[in-house]
Image (cartoon, rainbow, N blue to C red):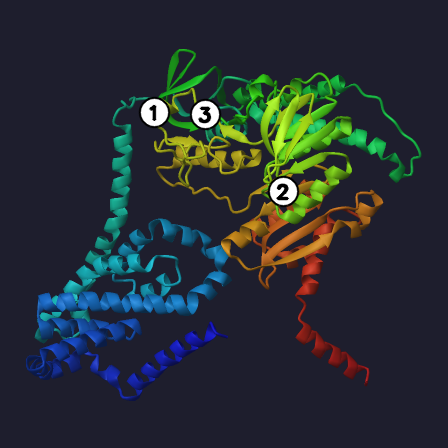
């Protein structure tokens, strides 16, 4: 109520002033005819009382502009006729800017919070653009008279542009138009209508002038490009349209798309085709997870009605299966396959010599565009004593020959948790050390705590808020925020605390390609580096270190690189899913509660417990939940998280809904086969519907039914 009262008072004040103006017909004075008829009287008053007239005129102009009353143009003419060009221009310039700023602030005070809350998702991109280049866009709008200034005042008030920026940019942007009208006012006797001032040719001139900032921006970008290209000589012809450095997920897709549109493309890889995902990441980890899950299911045979079951396995054979899986998938990413698709594959270490030259194995190739897709590598922190330990990472873990009896894992992210559960299920005694308060830091607390408890129930010891401070032989020493120390003995250590972009050794330093503070390659929305023809995608640039996001970015690199002179596409990260393949799996799309709270977005939470699902009960997999975040009071999905068996597959329905723009009502109205795990999504939608049922309408429906029964 306290927040509403000032707004209500302001609205009453505005309507009160407008009523008085209408009641006394004051708007009739704001015409060219009235101005010409009364200008001599105004001049007489001005000569007798210059200070009072100037003050009254200034206040009237500010009030007219602030209330968006039609007539500011007439007052501008009057300023020229009454005060002359110089004084009139100064007066109107400051009065119009002050009035515009008051209108801007009024719009912001009355409407911005409500508009931003209601249309926050739609306005996100606009807000980001205004924060980056709001002054530029405002200046352009101020120069073009086809955009009514009062509309600009009100609309810009709804955006996050700073008030001081708005004031000074408006002051400068409106100056030229003000000068035209003030000058016309000096010649008032010759004017019969506004059309005589703002002729079609003058409007065209102003519009052309308004386009100047856009043209100027293009020129500046061109000059920047020329400056960055200046030290290099551009070849007259090129061997390739696109050269891709790195044959992981990002590089493979960039090369494939480029070849598919008949460009001549080369793909350079110094190690194995397929990159980390095939050889050391996604594929081997999922193969190990599957073997460990099978062993675990045998240990739990009694819950399936089987009295006794056992298995005998050799860890080395399990690792052999992992490598067999890699070998079986390898042909999908092989040189033979990609050369069959029209990609020239070059094995060797690449070095970028210039924006158009890449050296491989001592030979220099020329190319119109370059895409850097060199990925990332495991980060090993500098912990005292770690240099004396043969640590395992996702790169060398797969060469392990013996199952460690005691295993320590540093890092409570997806890789750390997946490996902790898998090795525990295979028989290791696993201790996971995480410095943060919760594992799975990217997820909401209820999600991370659910997974943590499941792993602990299986025997994994999870130490959160423990920092690894020193290695002494086969002992790790950790410390809590309370400076409590713990000694943990181990046979092997897996380090899974993050990954660092591969940016060294192939010419970036010499080229001066810009890096971010986190070590990734900086890129714009079109995935261009500071060299417009050098693109970047995948883990080496981020912001998501996910295989499917790397493939998604690759499309933009290929299309913007090959066709960017005609049309460039801004990278779309609006619907990004990710999954952690523990048991239960955790799969998320969009934003979770952490992200929405950080952005100040109002939302509703709907949950459905999978322990209630018929198919889950039948499979003895009745654990986990579906959690959907929707816009306040609406069925629009802002994000969804599923914790449960096959969560990564179940999430596809929510990914599709968010991408295609349909909500929970549509999911509720979709027939799901019975009995399936996928019904969990429908039941979650049903829970939302029950929570948002029209109680008032249903009361009337109940009365109708009572009447029908005659009761």
Say above or below: 153 vs 247: below
Assess disc 1: are there few (<14), some (14-19) or many (≥20) residues with their C-alpha within 10 Å of its C-alpha.
some
Say above or below: 611 vs 455: below
Eye-nearest disc, 3 or 2: 2
Give the residue furthest to the top.
362
Q: CA distance from mark 3 to mark 2?
A: 39 Å
Say above or below: 203 vs 453: below
Residue 29's quadrant in the figure?
Answer: bottom left
Q: CA distance from mark 2 to mark 1?
A: 41 Å
Q: Which residue is mark 3?
A: 244
Asked if one can make out residue 553 in the rendered structure from this viewpoint, the answer is yes
Q: Position of residue 579 (x, y in %)?
A: 63, 39
Asked if one can make out residue 326 in the rendered structure from this viewpoint, the answer is no
Please, what secondary structure does the residue beneath circle 2 have?
Answer: loop
- For marks 2 and 1, the one nearer the N-term is 2
Q: Position of residue 366 (x, y in %)?
A: 36, 20
Q: Which residue is mark 2?
A: 438
Eye-nearest disc, 2 or 1: 2
The numbered disc on residue 445 is none
- For marks 1 and 3, the one nearer the N-term is 3
């Amino acid at each position: 109520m306290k927040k509403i009262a000032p707004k209500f008072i302001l609205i009453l004040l505005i309507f009160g002033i407008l009523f008085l103006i209408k009641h006394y017909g004051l708007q009739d004075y704001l015409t060219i005819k009235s101005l010409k008829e009364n200008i001599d009287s105004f001049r007489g008053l001005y000569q007798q009382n210059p200070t009072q007239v100037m003050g009254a005129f200034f206040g009237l102009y500010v009030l007219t502009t602030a209330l968006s009353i039609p007539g500011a143009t007439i007052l501008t003419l009057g300023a020229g006729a009454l005060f002359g060009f110089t004084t009139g221009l100064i007066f109107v310039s400051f009065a119009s800017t002050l009035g515009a700023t008051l209108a801007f602030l009024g719009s912001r005070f009355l409407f911005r919070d409500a508009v931003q809350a209601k249309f926050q998702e739609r306005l996100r991109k606009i807000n980001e653009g205004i924060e980056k280049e709001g002054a530029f866009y405002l200046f352009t709008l101020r120069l073009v008279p086809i955009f009514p200034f009062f509309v600009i005042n009100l609309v810009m008030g709804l955006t996050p542009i700073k008030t001081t920026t708005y004031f000074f940019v408006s002051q400068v942007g409106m100056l030229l138009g003000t000068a035209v009208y003030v000058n016309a006012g000096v010649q008032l006797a010759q004017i019969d209508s506004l059309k005589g001032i703002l002729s079609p040719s003058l409007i065209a001139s102003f519009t052309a002038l308004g386009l100047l900032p856009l043209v100027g921006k293009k020129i500046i970008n061109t000059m920047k490009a020329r400056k960055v290209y200046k030290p290099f000589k551009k070849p007259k012809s090129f061997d390739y349209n696109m050269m891709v450095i790195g044959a992981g997920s990002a590089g493979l897709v960039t090369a494939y798309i480029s070849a598919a549109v008949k460009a001549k493309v080369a793909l350079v890889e110094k190690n194995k085709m397929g990159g980390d995902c095939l050889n050391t990441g996604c594929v081997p980890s999922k193969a190990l997870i599957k073997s460990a899950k099978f062993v675990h299911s045998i240990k739990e045979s009694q819950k399936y009605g089987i009295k006794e079951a056992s298995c005998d396995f050799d860890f080395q054979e399990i690792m052999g299966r992992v490598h067999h899986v890699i070998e079986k998938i390898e042909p999908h990413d092989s040189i033979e396959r990609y050369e069959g698709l029209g990609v020239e594959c070059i094995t060797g270490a690449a070095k970028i010599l210039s924006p158009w030259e890449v050296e491989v194995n001592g030979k220099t190739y020329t190319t119109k565009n370059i895409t850097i897709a060199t990925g990332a590598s495991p980060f090993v922190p500098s912990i005292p004593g770690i240099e004396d330990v043969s640590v395992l990472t996702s790169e060398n873990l797969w060469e392990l020959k013996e199952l460690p009896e005691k295993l320590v894992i540093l890092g409570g992210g997806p890789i750390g948790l997946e490996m902790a559960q898998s090795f525990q299920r295979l028989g290791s005694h696993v201790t996971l050390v995480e410095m943060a308060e919760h594992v799975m830091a990217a997820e909401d607390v209820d999600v991370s705590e659910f997974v943590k408890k499941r792993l602990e129930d299986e025997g994994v010891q999870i130490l959160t808020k423990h920092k690894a401070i020193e290695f002494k032989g086969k002992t790790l020493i950790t410390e809590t925020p309370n400076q409590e120390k713990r000694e943990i003995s181990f046979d092997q250590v897996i380090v899974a605390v993050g990954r660092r972009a591969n940016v060294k050794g192939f010419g970036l330093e010499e080229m001066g390609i810009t890096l971010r503070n986190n070590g990734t390659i900086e890129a714009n929305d079109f995935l261009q580096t500071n060299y417009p023809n050098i693109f970047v995608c995948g883990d080496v640039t981020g912001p998501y270190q996910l295989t499917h996001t790397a493939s998604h970015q690759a499309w933009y690199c290929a299309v913007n690189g090959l066709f960017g002179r005609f049309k460039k596409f801004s990278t779309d990260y609006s619907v990004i899913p990710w999954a952690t393949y523990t048991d239960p799996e955790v799969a998320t799309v969009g934003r979770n509660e952490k992200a929405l709270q950080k952005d100040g977005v109002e939302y509703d939470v709907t949950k459905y417990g999978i322990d209630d699902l018929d198919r889950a009960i039948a499979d003895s997999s009745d654990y986990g939940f579906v959690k959907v975040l929707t816009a306040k009071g609406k069925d629009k999905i802002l994000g969804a998280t599923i914790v449960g068996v096959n969560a990564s597959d179940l999430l596809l329905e929510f990914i599709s809904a968010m991408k295609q723009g349909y909500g929970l009502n549509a999911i509720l109205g979709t027939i799901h086969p019975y009995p399936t795990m996928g019904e969990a999504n429908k039941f979650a939608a049903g829970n939302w519907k029950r929570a948002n049922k029209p109680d008032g309408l249903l009361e009337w429906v109940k009365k109708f039914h009572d009447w029908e029964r005659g009761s």
